[in-house]
Image (cartoon, rainbow, N blue to C red):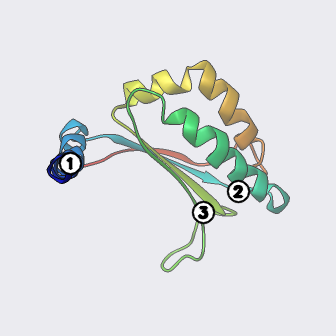
Amino acid sequence: MIMKRRAYLKTLLAAGAAVPVAAQKAAPKNPIVLYVDMQVAPAKEADLLRMFHNDFLPTAKKHEGFIDLKIVKLRTALQGAAPAGMNYRFQLTFASEELRQKWIASPDHARVWPPMEATMLDTKKYTVLLCDAV
């Protein structure tokens, strides 16, 4: 009985160690990274964060090509000037721009993005940068 348990644990540990290597091999070499600078109304910050963590992020993770998604709150500009009024930055990484386009054309995106965008003071004039990871 003890030997079987040890063998089982060794197998589990070996399999767990192999997962990160497999994940690294599957990751694309040069994904795209999208940055959205957001000026969120102070009274709506809690709503934004709740929607991001409870709905937007879990939904985006299900789509082909998804790699990573973060939202960060500006603490301070250490050098130069931060974009005017920006207090949050949204960072989305996808395997390719084509797969990101599929995501934004999906019914899921049409459901989860507009409520987040509605927390912004200006829903028409905000910076969106599309970058290539190099």
Closer to the chain start, of discs 2 and 1, is 1
| Mark 2 burial class by Cα count in 10 Å: few <14, some 14-19, many 20+ | many
> In whole angstroms, how far apart are the C-alphas of marks 1 and 3?
64 Å
Mark nearer the viewer, 2 or 1: 1
| Mark 1 burial class by Cα count in 10 Å: few <14, some 14-19, many 20+ | few
Q: Position of residue 87 (x, y in %)?
A: 66, 63
Mark 1 residue type: Met
Q: State left or right for residue 56 relative to residue 6.
A: right
Name the residue tied to disc 3: 83
71 to 85, vertically: above or below: above
Mark 3 residue type: Pro
Looking at this rendering, what residue extends furthest in the bottom direction? 78
Name the residue tied to disc 1: 1
Closer to the chain start, of discs 1 and 3, is 1
The label on residue 27 is none
> In whole angstroms, how far apart are the C-alphas of marks 3 and 2?
9 Å
Q: Position of residue 37 (x, y in %)?
A: 59, 53
Asked which secondary structure carries label 1, the reply is loop
Mark 2 residue type: Gln
Closer to the chain start, of discs 3 and 2, is 2
Name the residue tied to disc 2: 39
| Mark 3 burial class by Cα count in 10 Å: few <14, some 14-19, many 20+ | few
Q: State left or right for residue 32 relative to residue 10.
A: right
